[in-house]
Image (tube, rainbow, N blue to C red):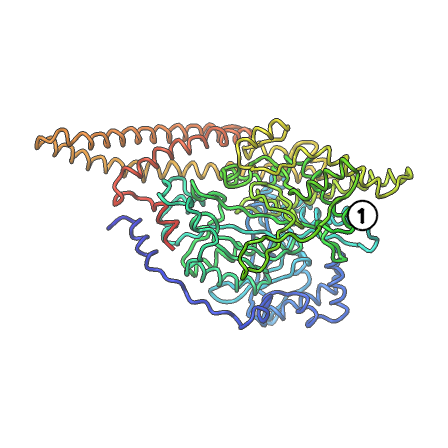
Amino acid sequence: MSNFRFKALEIAQARHALPVAPPADRVSDFYASHVFNNEVMRALLSPEAYLKMTQAIETGGKIDRDIADEVANAMKSWATSKGATHYTHWFQPLTGSTAEKHDAFFDITMEGKAIEKFKASALVQQEPDASSFPSGGLRNTFEARGYTGWDPGSPAFLMDNGAGGKTLCIPSVFISYTGEALDYKTPLLKAVHALDKAATAVCQFFDRNVSKVTPTLGAEQEYFLVDKALFLARPDLVMAGRTVFGHSPARGQQLEDHYFGTIPPRVNAFMVDFEFEAMKLGIPVRTRHNEVAPGQFEVAPTFEEVNLAIDHNALLMDLMEKVAERHSFKVLFHEKPFAGINGSGKHNNWSMGTDTGVNLLGPSTKPKESLRFLTFVVNVVKAVHDNADLLRASIASAGNEFRLGANEAPPAIMSVFLGETLTKALEDLENKSEISLQKGDNVYYKLGINRIPSLLRDNTDRNRTSPFAFTGNKFEFRAVGGGANSASTMIVLNTIVADQLAKFKIELDARLANGEKKELAVVDILKQYYRETKRILFEGNGYSDEWVEEAARRGLSNIKSTPEALGVYTKPESISLFERVGVLNHREVEARYEIELEKYIKNVQIESRVVGDLAMNHVVSTALKYQNKLAETAKALVDIGMTAEAEPVKDIIREISTRVVAIKNGVEEMTETRKRANNTSNTHETARIYATEVKDFFDKIRYHVDKLELVIDDEDWPLVKYREMLFIK
């Protein structure tokens, strides 16, 4: 067989699971062994320097230059002792991926001698140039200077370069020469600080001992695995990260037998391998399992402080791609790499914790603690209600457009699920002015099987169809895309909650100044907030058409296109919010809007070109060759007098002709529409045309291509099929 597809299949089918040896007998023996953490600092720094460093990390205080020099020297000694030859400021530009520029530790003395050198100046700040990163107009190409700055709150780590040597990676912010943020981390740190300040102030109404509130995050990462040979045989996967064509296989996910099923040996070896590497880097991955769609899997970590959790998720994605190469896999993080089966999300489990050890979203049976719990829950709900469109904008991307609302993921409609117990408590608060949040007696399932221990039922159920669901002691934002940087969403969520808590404090302070009793004033404000926001609460099936109709009756937004969603960023109220909370200024908001819009345009443009290329150079050419074979067959049948028997063959020839013409016309019209979009002088108009006109051709062309896949001989079809990519492991 000369078909490239069959060569790829032969390679994939011959692969076996690679043996993976643990770095040590116990995880605790190698966990965070590649991280410059507290334990390492305590061992290598002077007591004074260690104390100042830990205080600065905990409080966000400034680190003196002499302390930075000592830290830099300790980092260099530690890193080089473990085989590091270079260092880099590791940052997250607005491309959506991570970035790094490696510099060698060694320097040359005046005498020409090589020495290892790493000073505070190199630790604290680098100038990566980085003029080609998107800036949204914040700087011109000829104004190339940009700076990265050390973030001590996220520990430095060692990245194995694979071919030899290691690099010391220093998590950093990235700003322009004029000081504007060009990354995700800078506004995230500001949002985290704003939330800490606002939440701490509210906490002190209930407990004066609280001096710090930390938002936490656990990001569940879904992904697909495809054999590398099969991946390379699909140009659309290589160029666009998703398949633009492919007929659904007879067996997809309808049997529901893949979810939580036995993990295939090759996949399990890959999982074990990247988990070992993640553990070395201090990434607390704990859960692995098959997801709903065939070929789809999930990894989930323990909760961490939100800034560190986002760094770890970005690092984990990079790590998974590198480890996958060892196992001859390709990892797909795209939100919808295959049509007809579930796409991938990155469920963001978010909460807030105090320095006194209290989860502010954890229910309690004690009246004072229950009032505090409801205060934070209701304020979060109000923040989401009042800023639903902005939260929707934070998850907008070309990839997530294919996933949201596709009967597998939460819809583009922002709604909140609280569960029966919490909803009843709020109803009682509104109607009776009393708090009825009681855990009550434990409820056990009676299975009627003596050998099975009694199973305890949680107070709160989970709703997989809700984009923003309360799940017992946290909120799970399920609508974030699998390929996204969670910082985009966490910037918005922490900002809107910080703003809402600040408003709550102002309102409560005013009431207390008028002599109202604190508990009564809090209850009255919460009742008011609940009445104002209850329309966003929904307990039912968020995938259903009935909910779309109900949401419209409630006046909830259903923003389906990415350009429309991104436009919310530039509304005056959004800009005012970011400036008021101190997270982004006007220019930075406008820049992010332009960057995301251009990113959307380029992604759809690439997909459009891939659609045209594959359709004409792979599918149509194959169809015409196969049609010629059929024509020869039909002619031979007629020549020997089997005219009737030739009719079915002619029918197939006619179908191929019809579909080839439809594909050719569709590609030509799509190309002309794309040219028209590119010739507009307005970025938003270009994006609108790509979203509402160019993308419309994708499904139209795909329909005919996928039908041809069923007609053309399997031996001739050029593209690796879904049944091969999804089931050959």
Query: Can residue 276 be seen?
Result: yes
Residue lying farthest to the left in this orientation: 640
Rendering coords of residue 414 (x, y %): 61, 36
Q: Nearer the viewer, residue 80 or 213?
A: 213
Establish if 657 lies above or below 319.
above
Residue 137 appears in the figure: no
**Quadrant of res 110:** bottom right
Q: In the figure, 258 relative to 336: above or below?
A: below
325 sits to left or right of 496: left
Q: Nearer the viewer, residue 594 or 652?
A: 652
Q: Report the front residue among 690 and 80.
A: 690
For label 1, the crowd category at 10 Å Cα-Cα, with few meaning under 14, some 14 to 19 and many 20 or more, is: many
Using the rendered view, name the quadrant where residue 243 is placed. top left
| Residue in the foreground of this view, choosing between 548 and 315 | 548
Horizontal side of residue 532 vs 318, given as left or right = right
* SS for dot 1: helix
User: Who's the residue at 53% across and 57% down the image?
Assistant: 449
Residue underneath mark 1: 201
| Residue 433 sits in quarter | top right
Q: 379 above or below 693?
A: below
Query: Please, what is the three-letter code of the amino acid marked with disc 1?
Result: Ala
Q: In the rendered picture of this protein, how many numbered marks are placed on residues?
A: 1
Residue 404 locus on image (x, y percent)? 53, 38
